[in-house]
Amino acid sequence: MDRRSFLESCTARAAGAGGLAAALAAWQGPVQARTHGRALLVDERGDPLKAASLKPRTNYVFHYPFEATPVFLLDLGKAAAPVALSSKAGGVYQWPGGVGARRSIVAFSAICSHQLVYPTRDVSFISFRAQRAQRGLQDDLIHCCADHSQYDPARGAEVLSGPATQPLCAVLLNHDARADTLTAVGTLGGELFDEFFRKYEVKLSLDVGSNAKRPVAGQATVRELDRFCRNLVRC
């Protein structure tokens, strides 16, 4: 059994907190995977999201591990292999690659690692671009129009250009092959949630209220980004 198959098998068998911690330990390296509440991904009707229902190369968003922290969910349409990356602090970690039947489904924090730009209900300066941006290096990158940082989601959201100093934080997913469902189980890489909450404390209190820092557990609703956000900035 290869590493990715082993990881999904371990996570699928993890019934309790101890089992989940043991499964996440398989990702451990100098930078540790972090356990957060398990959140089944559901559609806007509240039904479990089927991995096969995701449209390839399309922006989806959900919130995890906190009520106010957005995540990009992407089916890249091609397999994403594991890759070694490093955080801003220099810690090396092994991103496990994509999940799903084609190993093509990935998830990353939608908070840009340079200026902490993120999608809101009103506007999003950061998104996945199936075709390259005006100042883009190639197709199929996550591009932030605020500073023109570009991340490659097929390689763990590593930085390809711009001032960003570390990859987007990865959200670890478990794919249940029998039910074809996806569950967020933790994060890996350089988390910026503390900085995010400090920078946007006032805005988040207005947009989300007192629940902004509440951990997500149980389920998380997935929407296409253009249904979540009123204005997707293109550049």
Image (cartoon, rainbow, N blue to C red):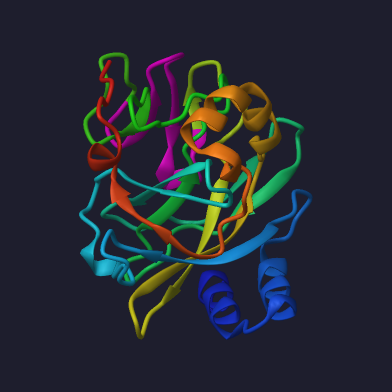
The percent coordinates of residue 21 (x first, y second) are 72, 71
At x 30%, y 67%, the residue is 51
The N terminus appears in which quarter of the rendering? Answer: bottom right
- Is residue 112 shown to the viewer in this render? no
- Is residue 227 shown to the viewer in this render? yes
Q: Nearer the viewer, residue 3 or 184?
A: 184
Q: Nearer the viewer, residue 78 or 170?
A: 170
The C terminus appears in which quarter of the rendering? Answer: top left
Residue 145: image quadrant is top left
Q: Within the magenta stretch, is there residue 209?
A: no
The percent coordinates of residue 199 (x first, y second) are 63, 22
At x 53%, y 24%, the residue is 203
The percent coordinates of residue 167 (x first, y second) are 56, 35
**Residue 170 appears left or right of 103:** right
Residue 194: image quadrant is top right
Q: Within the magenta stretch, is there residue 140?
A: yes
Q: Is residue 191 above or below residue 145?
A: below
**Residue 79 appears left or right of 216:** left
Q: How many marks?
A: 0
**Residue 75 appears left or right of 30:** left
The percent coordinates of residue 5 (x first, y second) are 51, 76
The residue stretch that appears in magenta: 138-158
Q: Is residue 189 above or below residue 150?
A: below
